[in-house]
């Protein structure tokens, strides 16, 4: 049987999709394009209205180009609006997030049986599966925070952490398969361990993973500012097990807007945090998320945001124009910002992001960084998240040393 997986949204969805991919391959299925597949899994996002729309458009396009495809839909949009998703063409299953663990077994009931015939599939995973050289490992899901704009707590449920021993065994399995980089991810990664008995913490998890002494680099995915303690920063700075790379969502720099968003920190706290990261890790990549056009955002609020970002130590931004999500507190707020103004503000922040990235890239020219080869070996992602083109001669998934020679090019060094 031929399958295809289409993934929208966050790294947690990417990690879930990688799990589906592994199960399907282990049972004997073969990867194909959505146009050629017998089974298509669409893993949806619902963080914005445009994310919902993208999922609908993709499903309709697959159904048009492949009328025989059996489409199974999961993810946050499928969880939030299952009836709407079920009405789309060729959709044979709608599986909510809470049932993702059984998705492959459920999906296979809609397709021909294959594999060894007894329902047991052997493990099969290696670098390059689904085009991924690094492995995205979900160690937590769910969220109990009360950000006024966010629908995700209702689609992902309460926080649930993978027990520390299980994470360690997963890491051992993944590294034994040859993966050299693992991205640790979660819906609210910083809450890791708070739901476990006995209670644990993200710091405890990171410390335990560093102690494994495996030939692997851990990259920490998006981490809420209030969860990024100085002890975590100091651990990353002192251990070769971790990439010098943080993603710390700011969302806004106006204290008034942060309060309306329900974000539990101030711009002073955030600024102090990222300055500490830059002090301890001078070459670190520091990304962030920003929302523009939040209800009630004034010109003055926006100017505060732009002014902070322009001089911050951040290196790149993900910019989100505000989108109403029915059922959130923000959706009931007044003070909607006009669409053209939201688009103008988003464009202005994206321009700042380009300047921040250029400034960071320029600062790295001439430095020598460790990195991992991707694709056909001519692309390297450095430990501090630069993507550099290099000369041919290496295979995918090799550790290399590379001298940064321009914003996008590197020179491979011996040794």
Image (cartoon, grey):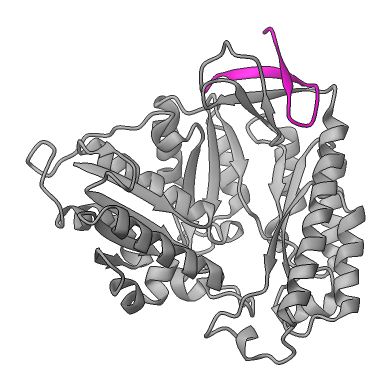
Q: Is 372 placed above or below 309 here?
A: above
Residue 271 visible in this rendered orientation of the protein: yes
Q: Is residue 50 left or right of residue 147?
A: left
Q: Is residue 67 magenta?
A: no
Residue at 82% x, 62% y is: 348
Q: Is residue 184 left or right of residue 87?
A: right
Task: Give the extent of the magenta segment.
Answer: 397-415
Percent across and percent down for residue 18 are 40, 44
Residue 332 appears in which quarter of the rendering? bottom right
Residue at 31% x, 78% y is: 83
The furthest residue to the front: 64
Front-most of residues 119 and 20: 20
Q: Is residue 403 magenta?
A: yes
Q: Quadrant of the C terminus?
A: top right
Percent across and percent down for residue 6 are 40, 51
Front-most of residues 193 and 344: 344
């Amino acid at each position: 049987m031929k399958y295809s997986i289409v993934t929208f949204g966050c790294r947690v969805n990417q990690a879930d999709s990688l799990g589906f991919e592994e199960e399907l391959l282990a049972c004997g299925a073969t990867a194909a394009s959505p146009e050629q597949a017998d089974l298509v899994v669409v893993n949806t996002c619902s963080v914005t209205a445009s994310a919902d729309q993208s999922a609908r458009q993709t499903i309709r396009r697959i159904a048009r180009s492949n009328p025989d495809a059996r489409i199974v839909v999961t993810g946050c949009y499928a969880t939030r609006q299952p009836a709407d998703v079920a009405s789309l063409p060729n959709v044979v299953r709608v599986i909510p997030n809470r049932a993702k663990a059984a998705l492959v077994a459920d999906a296979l009931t809609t397709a021909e049986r294959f594999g060894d015939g007894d329902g047991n599939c052997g493990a099969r995973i290696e670098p390059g599966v689904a085009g991924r050289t690094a492995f995205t490992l979900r160690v937590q899901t769910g969220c109990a925070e009360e950000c006024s704009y966010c629908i995700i707590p209702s689609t992902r449920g309460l926080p649930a952490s993978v027990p520390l021993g299980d994470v360690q065994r997963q890491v051992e399995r993944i590294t034994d398969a040859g993966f050299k980089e693992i991205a640790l991810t979660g819906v609210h990664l910083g809450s890791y361990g708070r739901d476990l008995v006995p209670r644990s913490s993200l710091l405890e998890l990171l410390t335990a993973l560093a102690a494994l002494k495996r030939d692997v680099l851990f990259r920490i995915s998006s981490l809420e500012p209030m969860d990024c303690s100085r002890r975590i920063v100091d651990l990353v700075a002192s251990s070769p097990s971790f990439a010098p790379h943080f993603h710390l969502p700011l969302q806004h720099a106006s204290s008034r807007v942060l309060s309306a968003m329900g974000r539990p920190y101030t711009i002073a706290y955030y600024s102090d945090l990222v300055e500490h990261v830059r002090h301890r890790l001078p070459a670190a990549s520091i990304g962030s998320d920003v929302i523009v056009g939040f209800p009630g955002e004034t010109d003055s609020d926006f100017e505060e945001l732009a002014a902070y970002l322009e001089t911050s130590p951040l290196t790149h931004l993900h910019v989100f124009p505000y989108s109403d999500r029915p059922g959130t507190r923000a959706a009931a707020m007044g003070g909607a910002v006009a669409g053209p103004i939201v688009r103008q503000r988003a464009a202005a922040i994206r321009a700042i992001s380009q300047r921040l990235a250029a400034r960071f890239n320029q600062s790295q020219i001439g430095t020598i960084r460790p990195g991992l080869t991707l694709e056909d070996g001519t692309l390297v992602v450095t430990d501090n998240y630069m993507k550099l083109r290099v000369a041919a001669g290496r295979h995918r998934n090799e550790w290399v040393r590379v001298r940064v020679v321009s914003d996008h090019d590197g020179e491979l060094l011996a040794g």
